[in-house]
Amino acid sequence: MEKVTGIGGFFFRANDPKALALWYQQHLGILTIPTSDGETAWQQEAGATAFTPFPETSKYFGDPQKVWMLNFRVRDVDKMAVQLRAAGIEVKVDPESYPYGRFARLHDPEGNPIELWQPAKADAAH
């Protein structure tokens, strides 16, 4: 059976697409689609990707009006939290360490939920 090889893009509506794209670039290092020659798109590192539908009644994303949540892999969740807080962004680091890694939560300027995931060392290579 043929299978997809990864996520090729994530497209979503925004109240102010240019400002939101700039926020993701400045604070999370995510480049948007190139708009001119010489620009490159964001390149992901190889690693595990969770793809999980949740029940409509799930409270995991916070605001019940939000129907998706981005989960980004990071090398060091604590260092990323310090960097984001220095930019005035509220970040909640989960104090618990799980067998599959550590997590932190934040929201982009339009209130979309974001989860940061520092995979456990054994998971990081997969």
Image (spheres, rainbow, N blue to C red):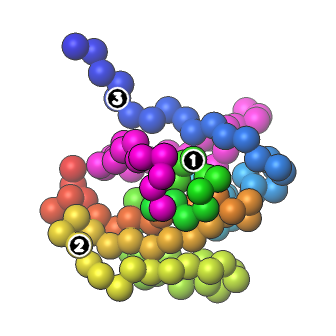
**Secondary-structure class at tag 1:** loop
**Secondary-structure class at tag 2:** loop
Q: Is residue 75 above or below residue 8?
A: below
Would you say residue 76 is visible in this rendering?
Answer: yes
Amino acid at the residue labelled 2: Tyr
Q: Is residue 14 above or below residue 77?
A: above
Which image quarter: residue 90?
bottom right
Q: Which residue is denoted by mark 3 in the rendering?
A: 5
On residue 67, the disc is 1
On residue 98, the disc is 2
In the displayed structure image, the side of residue 57 where residue 6 appears, left or right = left
Would you say residue 39 is visible in this rendering?
Answer: no
Where residue 119 appears, as percent x and y from the top left, is 29, 64
In the displayed structure image, the side of residue 107 where residue 14 appears, left or right = right
In the displayed structure image, the side of residue 33 where residue 57 appears, left or right = left
In the rendered structure, which segment of residues is drawn in magenta? 31-59
Gap between marks 1 and 3 measured at Cα = 24 Å
